[in-house]
Amino acid sequence: MKRTTVVLLALLTAAPVQARITIDQPHIASKEVGPLLREAHKMIAAKNYKAALVKVNEAEAVQATPDDAYVINQFRQAIAAASVDRTKPTCTTPTGLTNCNGLPAVKSQH
């Protein structure tokens, strides 16, 4: 184990700078946006997506940094993904086999 660690460490330190894997810096919301997003997070956890979106909109109105915009966008995506009703069929499918009421689509005779 010790030998593997030393070899791995040697390989990582010998790699050219361009080939090194970097980890993005964390995105930190400003003091104006942070409390609003904390409230939105609690609302998402409670599955109150409409109220969470209201808080995200409030946060967007006071955003001050590029990190604010990034974090707000992440919250919007989380709300959109969580609020999808997966029990209902979609209105459009590539094959057109279902319609909005969930019944089989009737193909036209044109």
Image (cartoon, rainbow, N blue to C red):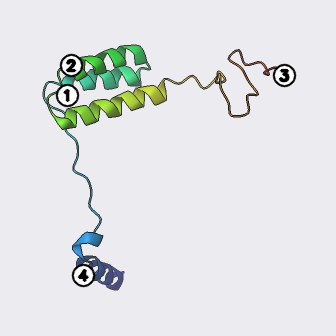
Question: In the picture, which quadrant includes the N terminus?
Answer: bottom left
* Residue at numbered disc 3: 110
Residue at (14, 31) in percent of width and height: 30
Q: Does the image show residue 48?
A: no
Instruction: Give, as a three-letter code, the residue at label 3.
Output: His
Q: How crowded is mark 2: few (under 14 residues within 10 Å), some or many (20 or more)?
A: few
Of mark 3 and mark 1, the one earlier in the sequence is 1
Please report the residue visible at 34 percent of the width from the left and 34 percent of the height from the top: 74
Q: In the displayed structure, would residue 94 be above or below residue 108?
A: below
Is label 4 or label 1 in front? 4
Q: Which mark is residue 34?
A: 1
How many residues crowd around disc 1 within 10 Å: few (fewer than 14), some, or many (20 or more)? Answer: some
Question: Which mark lies nearer to you, 2 or 4?
Answer: 2
The residue that label 2 is drawn on is 61
Instruction: State the separation of the CA atoms marked 3 and 1.
Output: 57 Å
Label drawn at residue 14: 4
Residue 75, image x, y percentages: 34, 30
Q: In this view, does 7 lie above or below 49?
A: below
Label 4–label 1 contact, CB within 8 A: no
- In whole angstroms, how far apart are the C-alphas of marks 2 and 3? 51 Å
Q: What residue type is labelled 4?
A: Ala
Q: What residue type is labelled 2?
A: Ala
Q: Which of marks 2 and 3 is in front?
A: 3
**Disc with the residue nearer the chain's start (2 vs 4):** 4
Marks 4 and 3, the one that precedes in the sequence = 4
Other-residue count near label 4 (Cα within 10 Å), few / some / many at <14 / 14–19 / ≥20: few
Q: Position of residue 65 (x, y in %)?
A: 15, 33
| Label 3 close to label 1 by CB (< 8 Å) | no
Distance CA(mark 4)–CA(mark 3): 68 Å
Left or right, 103 with reference to 24: right
Position in image of residue 93 (x %, y %): 68, 30
